[in-house]
Each structure stands twice: as C-alpha cells, then as structure tokens.
Amino acid sequence: AMPIFIARQWIRHRTANVNEYSARYSIVPDRFYRPSVDNIRRQSSTNRQGGDESIEVKTAEDFISLLEDSEKLYSRYL
C-alpha cells in the first residue's frame, strides 16, 4: 500500500499495472503515516515541499491529540 499521490505518479510513468482497492463499500485498514512528536515541523516559507525547524513539544502533542480525536470521530461516524 502507498499514498494515492505516489500511486498516481507511478502509474503515470507506466511502470506497473495495478489493481486499485475501492473503499466505497469496504472498511479500509489503518495504514496512515503518523509522525512522531519530534518529527512534526512547520512548513517552510521558501520551499513548499519542505519543513523548517520542529515546533514546540506541547503544540506537537496537541496536533497528535487532534489527529487521534478526528480518527475516533470518523470511525464513530461510520
């Protein structure tokens, strides 16, 4: 499994023939990238695809907490 944006780029260059998995009527397994607290960074002001220095630990912990809360709420919604 890989992020959809990587899969699309991969297919675009015709390096493989891939069957996609539709999540419309299926439960998708939890395979998301979750950064550790020390890997959460601010977005770079000069490089749109890069990060600047790490953010404060409390802010990073709050971010992870919000991420977990949103996943719980989404699973309740289903």
Image (tube, rainbow, N blue to C red):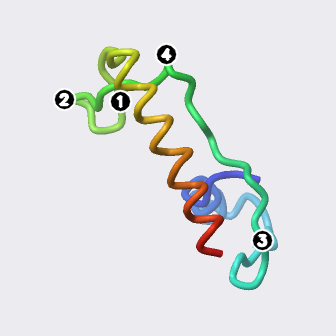
- Residue at image position (41%, 25%) is 60
2 and 1 marks in contact (CB < 8 Å): yes
Q: Earlier in the sequence, mark 1 or mark 4?
A: 4
Q: Residue at x 80, y 68 (%)?
A: 17
The tag earlier along the polypeptide, 4 or 3, is: 3
The correct choice, above or below, for 78 with respect to 56 in the image is below
Measure the C-alpha gap from mark 4 to mark 3.
31 Å
User: Mark 3 = which residue?
Assistant: 27
- Local secondary structure at mark 3: loop
Choose the circle earlier in sequence order: 2 or 4.
Answer: 4
Q: Quadrant of residue 21?
A: bottom right
Horizontal placement of 42 versus 68: left or right?
A: left
Q: Residue 68 occupies which quadrant of the picture? A: top right
**Disc 1 target residue:** 50
Disc 3 crowd, CA 10 A, few/some/many (<14, 14-19, 20+): few
Q: Picture coordinates of residue 42 (x, y %)?
A: 30, 27
In the rendered structure, are the residues bearing label 3 and label 2 in contact, judged by CB atoms less than 8 Å apart? Answer: no
Q: Are marks 4 and 3 in contact (CB under 8 Å)?
A: no
User: To which residue does mark 4 refer?
Assistant: 38
Type of residue at label 3? Ile
Q: Which mark is residue 46?
A: 2
Q: What separation in Å lies between label 2 and label 1 (alpha carbons)?
A: 8 Å
Residue type highlighted by circle 1: Gly
Cβ atoms under marks 1 and 4 closer than 8 Å: no
- Say few, some or many: other residues with alpha carbon within 10 Å of mark 4 (under 14 / 14 to 19 / 20 or more): few
Q: Nearer the viewer, mark 2 or mark 4?
A: 4
Q: Give the residue at x 59% y 53%.
A: 6
Mark 3–mark 1 Cα distance, whole angstroms, equals 32 Å
Percent from the top left, x then y, of residue 31?
73, 49
